[in-house]
Amino acid sequence: MKINYHIHTVFSDGSSSITDYCKTAIQRGFEEIAFTDHLTVFPDGSTETHSLNTLKIEDYVREVKAASGKYRDRVTIRLGVEVDYIPGNEEIVERILKNYDFDLVIGSVHFVDSICIDSSRQRALVEKMVRENGFDSLYSKYLRLVGMAVETGFFDIVGHMDLVKIWGFTPADGFEDEQKALELIKERKLCLEVSSRGLRQPVSSIYPSPRILKRACELGIPITIGTDAHSIGEIDYAYNVLIEYIRTIGYEHITTFSKRRPLEKKVE
Ligand SMILES: [Zn+2]
Ligand SMILES: [Zn+2]
């Protein structure tokens, strides 16, 4: 079962088309992939420039569905979206999500206090926050936002749960914050994403950390896997490393989604 549940196309900040991803997925032996372009809506209703917006989303949904039909015999294509959780954007997000029959919705936190923590243009601001208040304070803030995202009930999957360590930070403590977020994820029956994206970023490690993933496994929280691909070259980025990682932690199943319903698949 080779799957990738986190892929960005030219509809948001990716550089490859839906068709090129489908062809590459078939060539590289994927059984199932999910397109998850960004939907980044701010509380005032404006969208991030690279994000899907009310116009682009129509074409995106139509194109993913067309590809899903066209390649049906060779690869399963799911319609997903990666939605930013930003306090105050709940009503708008809820309204948009209701209009489309997504197979899966990833909820991700990229913004803390209006700073996009994974943008290289804002890295200096993140580093300033860490210098002034220490990384644990930012880590705690980030995980609280993850918990708030979970509580909206909008999402199936928590994207890159500890992305905040991106620039190479490690929490000195942070266990309790992780624990609180994980308990909410369990209570709300969400899935945790295991992502190889961090391996190509300064932190050089998989999201989430072994400590988080071990605890998630003990709690019986299901997982999906993705590479957070932004081009076809990243479609199976460190894929074997990811599989080895989840196996070592103790996971034997990966969860896939159809029309927001989870389906468990055995890791092979
Ligand atoms: Zn993301
Ligand atoms: Zn992403």
Image (cartoon, rainbow, N blue to C red):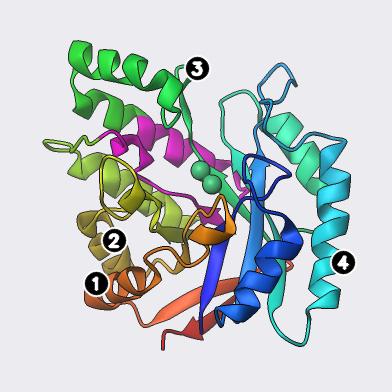
Residue 41 spot, x, y in % from top left? 68, 28
Q: Quadrant of residue 5?
A: bottom right
Rounded to the nearest angstrom, the CA distance separating label 4 from label 2 is 36 Å
Tell me the residue at 56%/35% (across/down).
85
Along the viewing direction, whichever of 250 and 24 lies nearer the viewer? 24
Q: CA distance from mark 1 to mark 2?
A: 7 Å
The magenta region covers 142-167
Q: Is residue 107 shown above or below 51?
A: below
**Real-space Cα distance between discs 2 and 3?**
28 Å
Query: Pointers 1 and 2 in contact (CB under 8 A)?
Result: yes
Of the numbered discs 1 and 2, the one sitting upstream in the chain is 2
| 121 vs 142: above or below | above
- Mark 3 highlights which residue? 114
Observer-nearest of 154 and 26:
26
Tell me the element at label 3: loop
Circle 2 residue: 213
Task: Give the amino acid type for the residue marked by disc 4 in the picture.
Answer: Ala
